Image (cartoon, grey):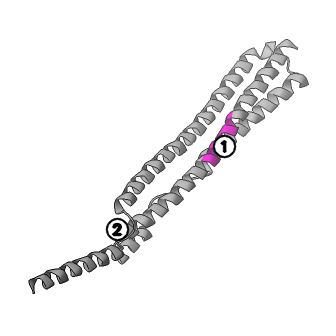
Amino acid sequence: MTAQTEESDETGDASKDEDEAATEPAYDIETYRHALEEARRTLDQQLEAFNDVTDKAWRIVQMNGIIATVYTAAVANALPELSFTYLSGIPIGLGLILLGVSVYLATEGQEAQTVTIGQSSDAFESLRATDPPEIAYLYETLKDYETWIDQVNEKTTTNGDTVNTAKRALIVGVVFIVIGTLLAVVV
């Protein structure tokens, strides 16, 4: 009789293990935790890049101000020796317009796209109200990070392109101003 009982217990344990295996989820919660950490690091790095674009835009605006100030002071001091003609005035005018365009684009690149990330207060309220299992929370948060990472990447790219165009406009504007000024000196 003892042998039968032991055999039944073994069979019961085996079916118990099968039931646990059937109800056990097919995911590893640690994998989700690691993925969430990686998503946080990725988002932090992208936010740094986004802030770098904003800083670059501000430096371009400052550079435009310095160039315009120095050029105005130099022309004011050298005005008697300069002879402005249409030939010299056109490149100078184009250069000054390009400096203005550069300031405008740099400002747009800095302000046009703002980044909104992070859980909203509604998400926290929902979390308290529903009290989901940890895996559901991790899954939803990971989905949110995917969205935030995509948004920051898109906005950084857009702002970066705008700021790079501002930088090019600044460089071309300076070249035109220099050419126009040289023509004013020579002619």
Real-space CA distance between mark 2 and mark 1, rounded to the nearest whole angstrom:
40 Å
Label 2 or label 1, whichever lies nearer to me, is 2
Residue at figure coordinates x 48%, y 63% from the top left: 143
Mark 2 or 1, nearer chain start: 2
Toward the viewer: 129 or 27? 27
The amino acid sitting under disc 1 is: Asp
Q: Secondary structure at mark 1?
A: helix
Left or right, 76 with reference to 90: left
Left or right, 166 with reference to 6: right
Dominant SS of magenta comes to helix
Residue 139 coordinates in the image, percent (x, y): 43, 65
Residue 106 coordinates in the image, percent (x, y): 65, 41
Q: Which residue is mark 1?
A: 161
Answer above or below: position of 159 versus 120.
above
Residue at figure coordinates x 56%, y 42% from the top left: 54
- The answer to whether one can see residue 120 in this image is no
**Quadrant location of the C terminus?**
top right
Q: How many marks?
A: 2
Residue at figure coordinates x 53%, y 42% from the top left: 49
Residue at figure coordinates x 60%, y 51% from the top left: 155
| Quarter residue 150 falls in | bottom right
* Range of residues picked out in magenta: 157-167
The amino acid sitting under disc 2 is: Glu
